[in-house]
Amino acid sequence: RPNMPALDSYWMPFTANRQFKQAPRLLASASGMYYADMDGRCVLDGTAGLWCVNAGHGRREIASAVERQLMTLDYAPSFQMGHPIAFEFAERLAAIAPGPEGQKLDRVFFTGSGSESVDTALKIAVAYQRAIGQGTRTRLIGRERGYHGVGFGGISVGGLVNNRRVFPTLPGTDHLRHTHDIARNAFTKDGLPKHGAELADDLERLVALHGTETIAAVIVEPVAGSTGVLLPPEGYLQRLREIATRHGILLIFDEVITGFGRLGSPFATDHFGVVPDLVTTAKGLTNGVIPMGAVFAGRHVHDALMHGPENAIELFHGYTYSGHPAACAAGLATLDIYESEGLLTRAGDLAAHWAKAMHALADAPHVVDVRTIGLVAGIELQPRDGAPGTRAYDVFTECLARGLLIRVTGDIIALSPPLIVEAGQIDEMAATLADVIDATA
Ligand code: PMP
């Protein structure tokens, strides 16, 4: 069988790297921390698939639970109808929901993906404002270099300028200034404020520009993942919360990546001790193996929508696959694994080892910055003159040849292994990366 289909053999744009005219590379099977390619070669998974396979690959418990569910009740609509496993899963999620006791965002809305979770949260925010008599608040604020999926809601609040240039976006969206320079500690030269809290004051600028009474919500990733692992500067999220509260703006954390243990706490909300009004999740919710997302809402939001005078008619929303029985079964089995193996906090136990291994790469050729948090790392390379992205792409290609899967975005290498990773495998990833960055310098 062909290992490398031709670049144009079928239409599936993201399997190929079109920029570098590379055909898709095929993965044939997976188990634990490893993929196998078509030749049976082992590839260490440095990315948990796509930031999602937190409990590792090929988990028998999940597969069995899905099979059992499919043979019991394979599908049931969630419009006017229900089924017990969706309620059971929501209840289990409520117990570990983001936020401290007494403030937990323990009302759950099921979706089919991260992009759907983002759309759902944005719609809930606008509907909430309307339900409390703030119907003029429809504006949605995102952040430069934010990534919130590929729905029209997500690209409108997202920070990828190309998306917004090509596609029509929701009217009334705007963006906070990005935090990348701050994250790299290279922030003074272009006049950006030095302290994270001051950067968050940018929300005040948008409030003054647009008027408080127009803004429904602000959405940010607590740690931006897909655009290069950008950590929030000290005080940033706290100040955003303060400003949003002062102006009656809902705060949404997009935890599609950071949810379910990636940072060493169940959610980034817990890690940073900042409580938003809504949290979007997907990926690790079902260990990435059955598509599903969930939006967590605070009780004030839930109650205003469900018990308010204008209630559900204002928020007609839901998907064919909301609370899909097979996905709920996968999710419940995933939670069982997370809890029995302590995976929701394991990234915290390994964080120091991880940080040490990754920061050792800071002296490798062309490395300009290394950022880590929990079990995530961003390793930023100096772009080649006139050929941005090529240096990291060479590293990606050579790592794969040596049996390590990494992810690159521009010239930033992103790592986020399954949370079952062992210390020895972390060392192996760092050693391979060091060799490859040297060899491709
Ligand atoms: N939000 C964030 C923060 C993400 O990282 C992603 C996916 N990488 C999404 C939303 C979109 O999720 P999906 O691809 O499941 O639609």
Image: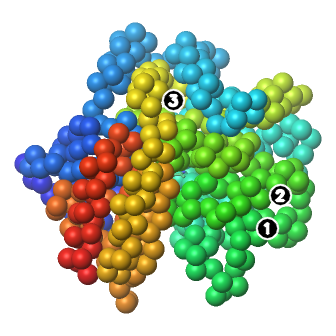
Circle nearer the N terminus (3, 1): 1
Q: Is residue 222 left or right of residue 18?
A: right
Q: Residue at x 58, y 80 (%)?
A: 186
Q: CA distance from mark 3 to mark 1?
A: 39 Å
Disc 2, SS: helix
Q: Which numbered mark, 3 or 2, is in the foreground of this view?
A: 2
Question: Residue 231 placed where, x, y %?
Answer: 57, 62
Q: CA distance from mark 3 to mark 2?
A: 36 Å
Q: Are marks 3 and 1 in contact (CB under 8 Å)?
A: no
* Quarter of the view holding residue 269: top right
The residue type indicated by label 1 comes to Asp
Q: Residue at x 31, y 53 (%)?
A: 426
Circle nearer the N terminus (3, 2): 2
Q: Residue at x 45, y 51 (%)?
A: 351
* Quarter of the view holding residue 386: bottom left
For label 3, the residue is 321
Question: Residue 51 placed where, x, y %?
Answer: 42, 48
For label 1, the residue is 201
The residue type indicated by label 2 comes to Ile
Q: Nearer the viewer, residue 13 or 100?
A: 100
Residue 372 visible to an observer of this rendering: yes
Q: Is residue 364 above or below residue 396?
A: below
Question: Could you classify mark 1 by the number of other residues whose Cα lies within 10 Å: few (under 14), some (14-19), or many (20 or more)?
Answer: some
Q: Is residue 44 left or right of residue 384?
A: left
Q: Which mark is residue 40?
A: none
Q: CA distance from mark 1 to mark 2?
A: 8 Å
Disc 1, SS: loop
Disc 3, SS: loop
Q: Which mark is residue 243?
A: 2
